[in-house]
Amino acid sequence: HKYDGLIITGAPVETMDFEQVTYWEELKDIMEWSKTPIFSTFHICWGAQAGLYYHYGIPKYQLPEKKFGVFAHKLNKERNIKLLRGFDDVYYVPHSRHTEVRREDILKDSRLTILSESEESGVYIVTAMHGRQVFVMGHPEYDPLTLKREYERDLAKGMDIKPPRNYFPNDNPTQPPVVSWRAHAHLLFANWLNYYVYQETPYILE
């Protein structure tokens, strides 16, 4: 059986070593299996870190404080790359994580290509196998209130956390958040589904 596409999402286990995650062995099996019958696999946040670690040995590092907010990103490659088709020179993406992968580790592996990154939040989109593997470090899928809910949740736990950056007007949590990432989130998923899944999938699956 062949499958069109697979999405491996994030999980709130990023401060643990990968091997400490209770379902790591099962996830490894899924990621290994994805290399054959899947036309493209889209990894998100911790799922992206897990995929880069499993397939390419890229480590993750603890951040001194949580990367939390909406950050500006730029493109590293010419815009005729199909995954980035229609993207502006600068666009915005939510991030919410305690760990990161580092560009210097990724650049050491010629099988990996960094398509987009941010001065503030680091590497964002990495691809491999001509787009059959896509690794996205942020959360383009977040709805308008996800960061707000996470902020309020952490405050309720008594955590010392700053409001998400570039999200509330004037960084004032009493004001409704401003959504600045919706258009590019739609573009990213639409481009992936169209160019890397739909157009790569034969009309008849055997």
Image (cartoon, rainbow, N blue to C red):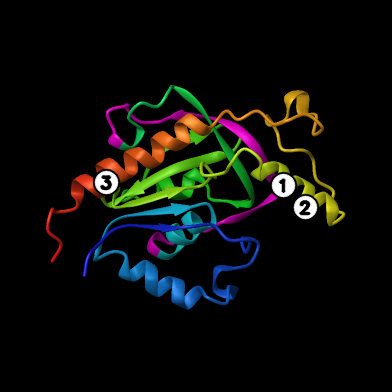
Query: Against 77, is 149 above or below?
Result: below
Q: Which residues are magenta?
A: 55-82
For the N terminus, the image quarter is bottom left
* Residue bearing mark 1: 149
What number is the disc on residue 173?
none
* Residue bearing mark 3: 196
Q: Earlier in the sequence, mark 2 or mark 3?
A: 2
Q: In the image, what residue type sits under mark 3?
A: Tyr
The picture places residue 23, in percent across and down from the top left corner, at 52, 75
Is residue 85 toward the left or the right of residue 64 in the image? left
- Asked whether the beta carbons under mark 2 and mark 1 sit within 8 Å of each other, the answer is yes
The picture places residue 77, in percent across and down from the top left corner, at 35, 30
Q: In the image, what residue type sits under mark 1?
A: Arg
Q: Say if the magenta span includes residue 106.
A: no
Structural crowding at the residue carrying mark 2, measured as other residues with C-alpha within 10 Å and reported as few (<14), some (14–19) or many (≥20): few
Disc 2/disc 1 C-alpha distance (Å): 6 Å
Residue for point 31% across, 70% down: 33
